[in-house]
Image (spheres, grey):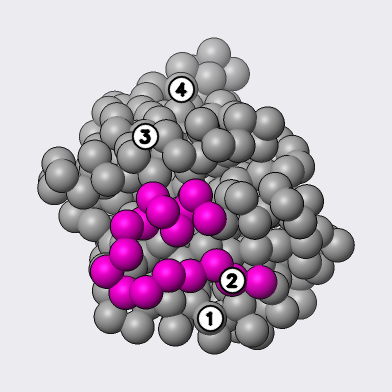
């Protein structure tokens, strides 16, 4: 099953919820102000932020009025185009090699599992991969990462529990450079986005990579649990302010009936979703497809 099939399966809850609301809207409303007000409410109930929902509806309304077309298929297609455009306006960075990918996020979003999947993703493309166990805070974090590294058949750099995460990154960068590794993927400890001291630790880790490996493409990706809802935007905003994120990795897409915050990430923060987890297996991670995502929920 390709990404499109996996995406459709993972987003079934979102599609069922959204499609039912749209069906009811069309059944009781003609295309007037009340219709567009309810469309805005549907978007907000799907975890699209108020400002992004207003933007989407305004774009749809303006084009529909200009075209003087009012049937359901036309408006649905217009909504599909508008949502896709919003996602694509947040530009996805081209990954160049060698590269360092540092994953950040709050506790429990699936960073370690995502690293295993990312390692498999890149090795499947013929790239050499090393993972760095810079989550030295959580008990057994490096052991858990070692299991995923074994599954993906990649090297791991790790220190003792309680070590300085920046020291782990320093050694991992030195190793990656010496062995001419294509991709270095860095695990970090889960941290609440409201804890300033933990954000400063991330900034220190960022500085090590920038100083020691300036020739590498450096991507800082926030791992977000798709079931988090609108709070995901608040998390992203705080992490972005601390370390200037390059994009998002979405996990647990199959567990949400909403997922509209993805549009708010693109619209308000210009943060693209780069990868999406579409299942539990090690190869259930794919490059995010904006058009496919919209198609799967409408």
The residue depicted at 73 percent of the width and 52 percent of the height is: 178
Element assignment for label 1: helix
Query: Closer to the N terminus: mark 4 or mark 2?
Result: 4
Question: Which stretch did the figure color magenta?
Answer: 155-171
**Mark 1 sits on what residue?**
146
Badge 4: few (under 14), some or many (20 or more) residues near its Cα, within 10 Å? some
| Percent x, y of residue 168 | 45, 58
Ranked by sequence position, the earlier of labels 1 and 2 is 1
Q: Mark 4 highlights which residue?
A: 59
The answer to whether marks 1 and 2 mark residues whose Cβ atoms lie closer than 8 Å is: yes
Mark 3 = which residue?
243
Residue of label 2: 156
Compute the Cα span from label 3 to label 2: 24 Å
Frontmost of labels 4 and 2 is 2
Mark 3 touching mark 2, by CB under 8 A?
Answer: no
| Relative image position of residue 66 (x, y in whole percent) | 54, 13
- Write down the quadrant of residue 181 in the picture: bottom right
Q: Residue at x 66, y 72 (%)?
A: 155
Q: Residue at x 19, y 55 (%)?
A: 192
- Foreground residue among 35 and 231: 231
């Amino acid at each position: 099953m390709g990404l499109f099939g996996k995406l459709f399966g993972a987003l079934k809850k979102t599609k069922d919820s959204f499609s039912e609301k749209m069906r009811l809207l069309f059944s009781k409303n003609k295309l007037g102000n009340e219709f567009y007000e309810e469309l805005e409410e549907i978007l907000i109930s799907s975890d699209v932020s108020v400002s992004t929902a207003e933007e989407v509806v305004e774009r749809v309304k303006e084009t529909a009025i200009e075209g003087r077309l009012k049937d359901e298929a036309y408006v649905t297609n217009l909504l599909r185009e508008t949502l896709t455009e919003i996602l694509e306006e947040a530009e996805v960075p081209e990954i160049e090699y060698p590269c360092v990918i540092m994953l950040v996020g709050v506790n429990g979003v699936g960073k370690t599992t995502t690293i295993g999947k990312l390692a498999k993703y890149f090795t499947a493309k013929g790239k050499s991969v090393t993972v760095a166990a810079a989550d030295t805070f959580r008990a057994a974090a490096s052991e858990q990462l070692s299991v995923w590294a074994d599954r993906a058949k990649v090297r791991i750099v790790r220190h003792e529990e309680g070590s300085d995460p920046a020291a782990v990154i320093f050694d991992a960068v030195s190793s990656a450079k010496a062995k001419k590794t294509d991709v270095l993927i860095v695990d970090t400890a889960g941290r609440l986005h409201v804890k300033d001291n933990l954000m400063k630790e991330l900034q220190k880790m960022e500085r090590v990579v920038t100083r020691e490996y300036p020739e590498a493409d450096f991507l800082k990706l926030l791992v977000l649990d798709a079931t988090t809802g609108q709070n995901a935007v608040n998390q992203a905003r705080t992490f972005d302010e601390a370390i200037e994120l390059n994009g998002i990795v979405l996990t647990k897409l199959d567990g949400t009936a909403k997922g509209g915050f993805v549009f708010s990430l693109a619209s308000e923060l210009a943060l693209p979703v780069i990868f999406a987890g579409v299942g539990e297996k090690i190869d259930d991670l794919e490059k995010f497809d904006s058009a496919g995502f919209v198609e799967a929920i409408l």
